Amino acid sequence: MSNKTFFSLLFLFIVSLTSSQTTMKEINEIVKEWASPTKFPDHIVLSATEDPSRSIAINWRTEANNKVGFVELALAGPGPYFKKNSKKYKAVRTVVDSEIAYKEGFKASYFEVQIDQLIPNTIYAYRVGDFHFKSEWHHFKTANNLSTPISFLYVGDAQNYILELWSRVIRNAYKTAPDADFFIHAGDLVDEGHEEIDWNEWFAAGGFIHSEIPAIAVPGNHEYRYLDGSLFSQDEVLSVQWNAQFGFPKNGPKELEKTCYYIDYPDLKIIALNSNIKIKRQAKWLREVLTKNDKKWTIVTYHHPVFSASSMRNNTEVRSQWQPIFEEFNLDLALQGHDHTYARGAIYEKPVLVKNDVEGNNIVGPVYVVSVSGAKMYSLDKSGWDKFGATQDKTGERIQLFQHISIDGDRLIYRSFDATGALFDRFELHKKNGKNIYID
Ligand SMILES: [Fe+2]
């Protein structure tokens, strides 16, 4: 090889190296482009409403220039002609500008339609969009209005590495229970609550699962963030996307719409609480709701645990305000997140020297669960519940989990699965004379 050829090849090698190196600025722009809305609808999500047997909420996103959106809805049919009988519902549009919180943010149009007067226990098909750009047709099934078995999925914090690693959890959850009636997300769905890129990961990871199984979600501390990074001049505020992107009920206390609410199934009440703010106000509301509650089963979900499962955490106000009400009204399950580890247990009615695995044991208040679905992991505080008289019956560390809970008459079966779909935890609750028998 001549010197001239050698230097020519070296020059070409350097040029190719330089040109293949993408700067951080370019990477950020590419990621922002990836997360940006277009004319085509995306982020399509179903939200459970107060009466899921007769109504549903549908939300989606497009680029900010889109001013009109609607849902087309029809009874689903076996062939393609079901859409001839579809009905159009005009959406309410909200423009969200996430650039007020992040320089990587942008304006987007969010659309919401709540559809009422549906037929219970019926499969509907719907698509969203405008006159030119529409989604595919999705299916959902309205809840039954009679006392029949019901089942649902529940996950703790997705929050980190959402597309990279949480995706396998939500997809395995769907494979385990494709007929789940709803999907509970117990807060910290994303890491940066105002960050459109994080939300785009959440929607990319869940895909059509979000569009076909109604969500019930509460905000975690990561959905409360400062708007401009100025820590001392303002309070953290709810994710700018939250109210525009979810259609949860507005039946909670004022100023907590869509973050504190209840949902009624024939034998089951789901109460979603916002453990970030106005804890005392919600205690008053919770008592009012429970005083009128005639459901056989009542399950509460919120983010910050009554009993922390990882160390250096203590949600004093949540515990002092809400735990006595959970016990007074004998709630069944408290589904929580926040601690990035796993603990499941209860307060036993009498000190249990030997657990009665065959007949079960009486407990005071609900079975408490702390779980995590995303990839950020903390160590377990093994003795953290002892001082509150609560027992950790099953614990786990550094495992991504999802839960499937099914209720049939007087029997509730709870199962927790790891990210591969293997069974990790299981217990049952049986109703007997108005009390719960806890079978560990
Ligand atoms: Fe959290």
Image (cartoon, rainbow, N blue to C red):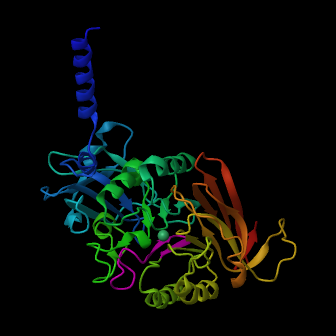
On screen, residue 205 above or below 318: above
Q: Nearer the viewer, residue 89 or 165?
A: 165
Q: Can residue 209 be seen at all in this image of the molecule?
A: no
Rendered view: 218 above or below 206: below
**Of 247 and 50, the residue lying toward us:** 247
Task: Confirm whether residue 155 shows in the render.
Answer: yes
Residue at 56% across / 81% down in the picture? 294
In the current view of this chain or complex, which residue is farthest to the front?
Answer: 3
Q: Residue furthest right?
A: 354
27 relative to 440 in the view: left or right: left
- Please provide the residue range marked out in magenta: 250-272
**Quadrant in the rendering for residue 343:** bottom right
Q: Residue at x 63, y 57 (%)?
A: 416
Q: Nearer the viewer, residue 122 or 231?
A: 231
Say whether residue 421 is left or right of residue 142: right
- In the picture, measured across the screen, residue 345 lies left or right of residue 263, that is right
Give the image location of residue 292, x and y in percent.
51, 86
Quarter containing the N terminus: top left
Position of residue 1 relative to residue 385, above or below, is: above
The x and y percentages for residue 106 are 20, 59
Task: Name the quarter where the C terminus is drawn.
Answer: bottom right
Q: Is residue 72 magenta?
A: no
Residue 120 in picture, x, y percent from top left: 43, 61
Where residue 172 sits: x, y (%)? 54, 47
Residue occupying the far top of the picture: 1
Image label count: 0
